[in-house]
Amino acid sequence: MTPDELKALLDAEEELFIVDLRNRAEHARSRIEGRRPVPVLNVPYFEVLDAEESDDIAASFAAYAEKHWRDRLPPGARILVVCAKGGASAYATEGLQRLGYNAANLAGGMEAWGNFYDRKAVVAGPDLSIYQVVRPARGDLSYVLVSGAEAVVVDPNRHVEQYQDFVAARGLRLAAVLDTHGHADHISGGPALAAVAGCRYHLHPYDAIHPIDVLPAAIPYEPLRDGQEIRFGSARLEVLHIPGHTIGNLAFLVNGTYLLSGDSLFIRSIARPDLGGRAEAWAPLHYRSLPRLLQLPDDVVVLPGHFSTPAEAGPDGTYATALGRLRRENDGLHLVQRGEAAFVAAILASLPEFPPQYVEIKRVNAGLVQPSEERASELEIGRNICALAEAYEHSPVRP
C-alpha cells in the first residue's frame, strides 16, 4: 500500500487495523491517524525474531502471529503492517498473508508516510485560488496562493519540490515565499524554495534571532512588518503581527476574506507560547494578540498552520472554518474571555512537554545548523505539538 492509497483509505474512513513493528518509543512519537480511531498492535520486530528463530523470517512471523495474535487481529479486516522503512514489515506481511489475513505492507514504511504530502483546493476562482498542502504525519499545513500568473507560498515544509513542481506545472511565477514565524516543529523550506525560484524569502525580523541562543539568523530574508501589503496578480495579502507563539508571529489576511493564521489560532485550540523558552513573557502577548484576530468579521475563513487530529478536517478534507464558528467552539478563545490573568494562569498550567529537538529545529531554521537528510528526518519524527489541544485533557484549569 502506497502512502497515497493509505491517505485515501483514511479519508474514506474505511476499516483498518495496523501492526506496527517499530520499537515502543518510536511508536509513541509517531502514529498513523485517521478521522476515526485506527486500532493498532505495536510489537517490536526484534521481539518476534527472538521468540521464533528461523531462516525463513516470514515463517517466523506467521508462527508468532498464530501463537500470540489470533485473538488480537480482527478476522476479515484490512491489516496494514508498518516499520521504519518498509523492510521488516514486508516479511511480517508475507507471514500474515500465509495465515490468510488481508494484509498489506506500507511501501517505504513510516519514513515514506512522514514525507508524504497531499493537496486540496480551499478556493479556486478566476482571481484567487488557495491550495492547502497537507503533511498528514506531521499535522503541518502550508499554502500556495495563486492569482493570475503569480503564486505565493506560505509556510513551506522542507521538501521544496512539492511546491516547485506545483508552480511549474501551472506555468506560474513564484513571487514570494513567506513564513508566518520561525518554526520549531519542522524544518522550513522557505529559504531554499526562494533561492531556487529566485524570489524573496520573508520573515518577521524578531524571529530572525534564535530565542534561546540569542544569535542572529544566518539566512537571507526580507523583513515583514505589521500592516505591510504584498500584492501578487490581482490579490492582496495584509501582514498582521500577532506575537505570542513567537515574538515575531504573523498572520496573513488575503483579500480581506481568508486568514492564514499560522501558529496562533487553530481549529480546536490556540498555539502554545513556550517553544522559545519564554512562556511567562509571551503568554500575555498571546492574550493581547488574539483579540485582534477576533475583530475580523465572522465570515472570514481561518486557514491554520497545523491540525491536531484529522477529525478537524471538513467533509472536503480541508482544514478551514469560519471565524464566527471558532468564537463559539474554540477552547483557546474561550480562555480569552476570562481576562488576561486567568488566561495566562490557565495556559502556563496546561503546557505539554517541551520537545528538546525543537530547540535544534529552530537553529536549523535560523541557518545556524546544517543537518544531513538523515538528521533532518530524525528531528521531524512525530506529529507537531505546537497547539494546546492535547494539553486540555490534562489541564487543572479546563477551558
Image (spheres, rainbow, N blue to C red):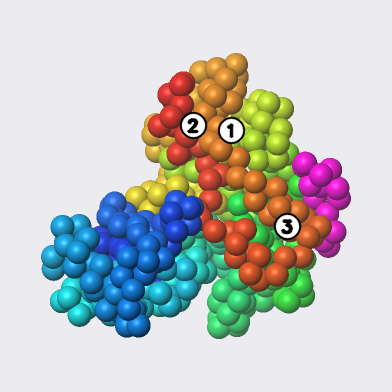
Q: Is residue 141 above or below residue 312?
A: below
Image position, residue 263 (x, y; %): 59, 45
Q: Quadrant of the N terminus?
A: bottom left
Q: Is residue 302 left or right of residue 250?
A: left
Is the C-beta separation of discs 3 and 2 under 8 Å?
Answer: no
Name the front one of labels 2 and 1. 2
Majority SS type along the magenta span: loop
Indicate the secondary structure of the residue bearing disc 3: helix
Mark 1 residue crowding within 10 angstroms, few (<14) / some (14–19) / many (20+)? some
Name the front one of labels 3 and 2. 3
Spatial CA span between label 3 and label 2 = 27 Å
Spatial CA span between label 2 and label 1 = 10 Å
Residue type at numbered disc 1 = Leu
Which residue is nearer to you in this view: 115 or 40? 40
Residue 137 appears in the figure: yes
Residue type at numbered disc 3 = Asn
Using the image, tell me which numbered label, if any, was put on residue 332: 2
Asked which quadrant contains residue 136, the reply is: bottom left
Task: Compare marks 2 and 1 and give the one earlier in the sequence.
Answer: 1
Query: Which residue bears the numbered disc 1?
Result: 290
Residue found 43% across the figure and 29% down from its top: 394
Residue found 72% across the figure and 65% down from its top: 371
Q: Which range of residues does the magenta coloring cover?
A: 208-221
Using the image, tell me which numbered label, if any, was put on residue 365: 3
Is the C-beta separation of discs 2 and 1 under 8 Å?
Answer: yes
